[in-house]
Image (tube, grey):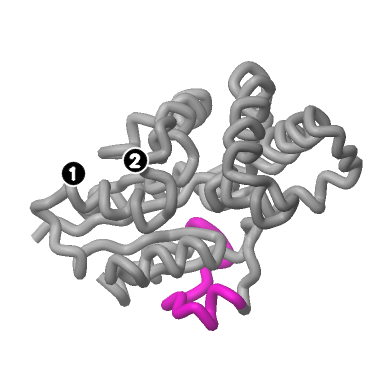
Amino acid sequence: MKKAVLFDLDGTLVDSSEGITKSVQYALKHFGIEENDLSKLQVFIGPPLGESFMKYYGFSKEQADEGIRVYRERYKPIGIFECKLYPGVRECIMQLRKQGYLIGVASSKPEKFCKMILEHFDVLSLFDDVVGATEDGSIGTKEEVLKEVMRRWADIPKENMCLIGDTIFDVEGANLVGIPAIGVSFGFGDIDEMVRAGAKGICNHMTDLPVMIEKFI
């Protein structure tokens, strides 16, 4: 029976804080908003950008769409590669593959960006599929991304899947589609929030994941 391990990208596989926060800062400046403390912009890492612009800065839907467009002016040529792979990622995935798992990415970042980042770190070939948001907005939330994974991998029962992520958005998305989620402590989310939302466990280092996953799928 096939089993699949799905990974969030930002905050789980890669530390993308620099590129994302600087690009959000660039977009806010377009609207006359000066934000010099990049740590305040880490809340943009994980959920869909448009939702964050509306939630944290009171943007209308139209302003949020414009914010995304301006954000990408900087992110596409510069910010996308202002990131680094977390320690142990390559070793973890190679071990999971040896154990027979299919490996996928399930991210709210646009799919083409996910692939570009993984290719940049020479790990794209380790993944069986990469599923991300669509630029037209038809797929954006973690729930929608996970449903697309299930559409593509229709031969794998959802009880044979799990999601690895770093925020409550990952855990809640997994809950909505009925798969277990394991949180990582080194990303950008709140550990207590993930536990309260129903995370099955918290992983402190990527190399611990292969053993943890065996308990749940």
Q: Are marks 2 and 1 in contact (CB under 8 Å)?
A: yes
Percent x, y for residue 76?
59, 21
- Judged left or right of residue 56, residue 131 is left
Residue found at x 87% / y 42%: 35
Element under disc 2:
strand
| Whether residue 81 is visible | no
Pick the front one: 48 or 86? 48
Q: What residue range appears in magenta? A: 193-207
- Residue 155, relative to residue 177: is it above or below? above
- Secondary structure found at label 1: helix
At a point 63% along the width and 51% down the height, the residue shown is 52
Q: Quadrant of residue 163?
A: bottom left
Based on the displayed image, in which of its 4 quarters is residue 126 positioned? Answer: top left
| Percent of width and height locating residue 156 | 14, 56
Cα separation between marks 2 and 1: 9 Å
Quadrant of the frame with the N terminus: bottom left
Residue where numbered disc 1 is placed:
152
